[in-house]
Image (tube, helix red, strand yellow):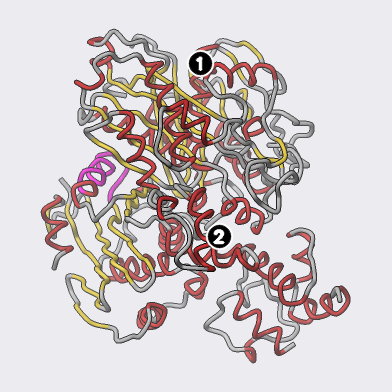
Amino acid sequence: MADLKVQIIDALNLKHLKPEDIGDDQPLFMDGLGLDSIDALELIVLLQQKHNTKIANAQEGSKIFMSVRSIADYITANQKN
Amino acid sequence: MSFISGFCHIREGRIITSLQDYRIAAGTVEEFLNEGYSRLKVAYPKFYKMDPQSQFGFLASEILLQERSIKQYPPEGISVVLSNSTASLDTDIRFQKSMQAAASPSLFVYTLANIVMGEICIRHGIKGENAFFITPAFDPQLLADYVENVLEQEHVEACVAGWVDVLGEYYDVFLYLAEKKSGMGQVHTAEEIEKLYTQ
Amino acid sequence: MNPTIHVVGAGVISSIGNSYDECFKALQNGEHGIRPLTSLDSIYKDILPVGEVNLTNEELAHHVGMDKPVTRTSLLGLYAAKEALHDAGINNFDRLRNGLISATTVGGMDRTEIFFPSYLKDKTSGHLSDVVHHGCGATTEVMARTLGIKHFISTINTACSSSVNAIMYGARLIQHGILDVVVAGGTDALTKFTINGFKSLMILDDDLCRPFDNDRKGLNLGEGAGFVVLVSDKVLKENNLISKAVVFGFANTNDAFHQTASSPEGRGSYDAMEQALNMAKLNPQAIDYINLHGTGTSNNDLSEGTAIKRLFHDKVPRLSSTKSFTGHTLGASGGIEAVFSIMALHHQCVFPNLRFQTPIDGLDIVPQRAFEKLPLTHVMSNSLGFGGNCSSIIFSKNLKR
């Protein structure tokens, strides 16, 4: 999950944060990190490009992107090899 | 006639306003922008998601409006009129590159000249008319005429106007505030705009 | 508004027709122009539904008499602007102070994106003639030179509201006596750049779009151009021109909410519509038909619909989105839809909103289902762009005041 956090910070231009600043179970889209709909789309691209995992639409994404852990779990369960 | 009550010019590593003139030593444009942002001492992490053009617009408007506030005006009473020669070319190039692997939505969002105005409006709660012109070079006459025209409307009190021209390591960003009733500063004419721009 | 601004000419090209009359027939017959992509060498070819203009660049160039290699955006713009000028029939155009305000978001990207792949592999390959007209301003300059417009040109790029902002600017230039005649509107060609970008935003419908329907899934992209010719009352009378419509009111605001999404309550669009009505000195009930921005995205239609309900309450006029016919033509949409609004006044009719079945939950707005002839006096057209740029314009029948 540490690697995933680095990738998320890079993909979303969260320059003011370090991986240690993001909790494994911290809500990503609430006040904490303040991510928005465009960030969700970038995460979809990240999963596709770096983890070979497809997400069909933005609505599906909002369930998967609750926290770093939920993203990691989804990747493990759905990664195409 | 309206008055120019403040300006901010960012070019060649310098930030110039009617009250200050200083340099930021930085290697790249990215470093310059990050340093400029941290000196503002504002908490606005959305800054990092913006493209360089919007970041420059944000910096210049933040400095300008810290020196000369518009908080006394209702949101609908403030307009924004900007211009440049490059439209969104700087970000278009980045987006085009991203298309080689996977089109980046956060880059695509900025491939429009006027998004910088959107960012300024969101930051300062500005709801009035906004227009963005593409001209071959900085055109003080166009700005003077159009902004005066906008300010002629009864409900419009102030206008943030200027030039946000960015491409790679080149940037020339000049914003000014025109106010209908302030009675202070320079008279809002093309000559005065030009004088401030070349200061 | 003083002085009165008359529309004396209109020209349009889109996926539903290569002229004002062809587009009208298609709108009348419910024939949309949205089909799987054919003209671009894209991974979405034959798959993605788009509104392509049914003429090749060669055919467009031949029609407008252009023998140099220019961009598709310029060709579409010239095509529509020439029709508008021909329609206006101004005999001494050259002796009037004339201007061109053109809008585009994509500029010459259609050629630039052909140049780039080979150039990136080998910097000695690719033709520079493919990129000299890349800039948005270059589109306008190419058009001005061909149309013989000498006194004033300007280019506006404010995303999807670009060309209606161009028309507003043109109206102001005449209002203030700076110009006698202005050709104003916009043009945009389909490009891989825009298709891939919109795909990444996940707001495209893989099927035909369904504006203002509860089950809508997104927009279809389109291309085209729409231009009008504007003159003052004085020029109208002195040159014996015929007024097709009058620019009665307009306004532009910023939603100040998000770079691409609209605020849920549609603040920006509400303010734009209200301020346009104020300029026209009209009550909301005076509007007979609204040509919606109506892209078919979940966000826009809910936001725009909410703003309309808040402004018109239970007296919502007839309304429809002609994007259900043409797709979303981006920078050209304001211009094309201004021409459709003028068409509605000219033919005294309202156009259908295709593929509508169920009203949006909680909104109770039923767009026009069929083409219908009705008496119309005032037509409103909305164009809401990325960056929160919201515009609304009112065209009216030329009533003697």
Which residue is drawn at the image coordinates 32% and 56% (left, top)?
B84
Is residue C53 a member of the stretch shown in magenta? no
Q: Residues within 10 Å of mark 1 (few under 14, many from 20)?
A: many
Where does residue A13 sit, x and y in percent of width and height? 55, 76
Given the image, on which type of amino acid does mark 1 rest? Leu
| Direction bottom: furthest residue | A20
Q: Tag 2's secondary structure?
A: helix
Where does residue B85 sit, x and y in percent of width and height? 32, 55
**B198 relative position to A62: left or right:** left
| Direction front: furthest residue | C124
Which residue is drawn at the image coordinates 39% and 81% (left, top)?
B41
Where does residue C34 sit, x and y in percent of width and height? 69, 34
Query: Eyeballing the image, is B167 above or below A51?
Result: above
Q: Is residue B35 something one can see in this rendering?
A: yes
Q: Tag 1's secondary structure?
A: helix
Magenta region: B144-158
Which residue is drawn at the image coordinates 44% and 43% (left, top)?
C104
**Residue beneath disc 2:** B108
**Residue beneath disc 1:** C345
Assess whether mark 2 and mark 1 are in contact (beta carbons under 8 angstroms). Answer: no
Given the image, on which type of amino acid does mark 2 rest? Phe
**C183 relative position to A4: left or right:** left
Which residue is drawn at the image coordinates 42% and 53% (left, top)?
C131
The quarter of the rendered structure image containing the N terminus of chain C is top left
Query: Eyeballing the image, is B161 above or below C279?
Result: below
